[in-house]
Image (spheres, rainbow, N blue to C red):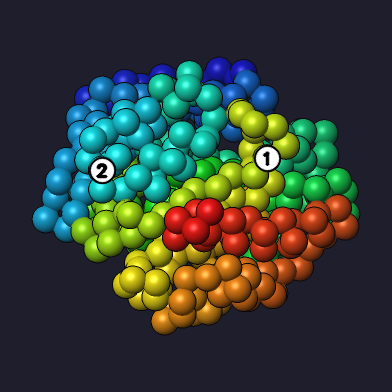
Amino acid sequence: MRPFEYVRAADAASSTAAVAAVADAKFLAGGTNLVDLMKEDIERPSRVVDIRSLPLREIKRSRAGLSIGALATNTETANHPLIRENYPLLTQAIVAGASGQLRNMATNGGNLLQRTRCNYFYDTATPCNKREAGSGCGAREGLNRMHAILGWSESCVATYPGDMANALYALGASVRVRAPDGRERLIPIAEFHRLPGDTPQRDNTLEHGELILAIELPVAAADFARNAHYLKVRDRASYAFAMVAVAAALDLDGGTIRQARVVLGSVAHKPWRSAEAEAALTGRRATEATFQQAAAAALRDARPLAHNTYKVELGQRSIVRALMRAARLA
């Protein structure tokens, strides 16, 4: 790990100012991703601003629905009565991620900002446009079994590794952030993460120095609370990143689907909400045949790489399975 300046923030204003003043400065919360990347010499901040003492841990009802503090831990969030009762899909997704020890440390804001687990990103001896812009993508023609099948570019085929964000996409969440000048803005979760394009080094749409304050969940998302399921398919049963994940939620009127949410994880540079699958479900009867048609629509435009063609069929089967469980048909 390289030397760096450590700053303990007193409040939100001083924390954003301290980061904005140094081009490579980083916020430090739980540190479960950033510290590892610093040890591996992938992240090299010359200043680290500790925000753990800021009052951003509260989980409370809001006028719009529910506000979840950015510094609340994943464990606190998953176990909170308001989350478990009204947004159980979020609890399922958080519990599916990492280990209990990591969830005790990891914060909600940091979870959204976690970086890819692509082996080429972590191996500083190999080219990676995400780690070093313009160096190339080692995974494009390399070993790419765990990589993207949707939305990738020639510059990057890495996937977003998180679970919590997949549920947040299905629930239509927004992210409240504060800029260094004190202004706040609300970013729809679908606009928070980026596809790689020609700038894969940019994971999200935050500007330098912007601080995540909270995640906002709308009241309307509770309509999906009774019929939702999070499915994570991985090589081993615990503490492994997904090959494919699915956040599925249905708003049912008897056996008819009024609205649907289908979000795929670990198939793209960001959580992938499938408008095609949702259109194939809306207004239809909740049956396995309907779910199979939606699954086929979701992966119709998939572009698998040399070693991850299996993700297409696995993704389709996972969508059907998640929807069957959401509809309580399995």
Quick check: 192 left or right of 293? left
Give residue 150's position: percent from left, percent from top: 67, 64
* Mark 2 or mark 1, earlier in chain: 2
Of residues 131 and 175, the one drawn nearer to the viewer in this rendering? 175
Mark 2: secondary structure: helix
Number of residue marks: 2
Quick check: 55 left or right of 330? left
Circle 2 residue: 85
Please tell me which residue is depicted at 31% across the width and 24% down the height of the picture: 52
The quarter holding residue 83 reads top left
Give residue 116's position: percent from left, percent from top: 62, 43
Above or below, 90 against 22 in this view is below
Mark 1: secondary structure: loop
Q: Is residue 247 visible?
A: no
Please tell me which residue is depicted at 74% across the width and 61% down the height of the picture: 313
Amino acid at circle 2? Glu
Confirm or deny contact between disc 2 and disc 1 (CB under 8 A).
no
Circle 1 residue: 234
Amino acid at circle 1? Arg
Please tell me which residue is depicted at 33% across the width and 71% down the height of the picture: 254
Quick check: 28 left or right of 202? left
The quarter holding residue 30 reads top left
Quick check: 328 left or right of 211? right
Residue ranking furthest to the left: 63
Please tell me which residue is depicted at 28% across the width and 62% down the height of the picture: 223
Q: Which mark is residue 286?
A: none
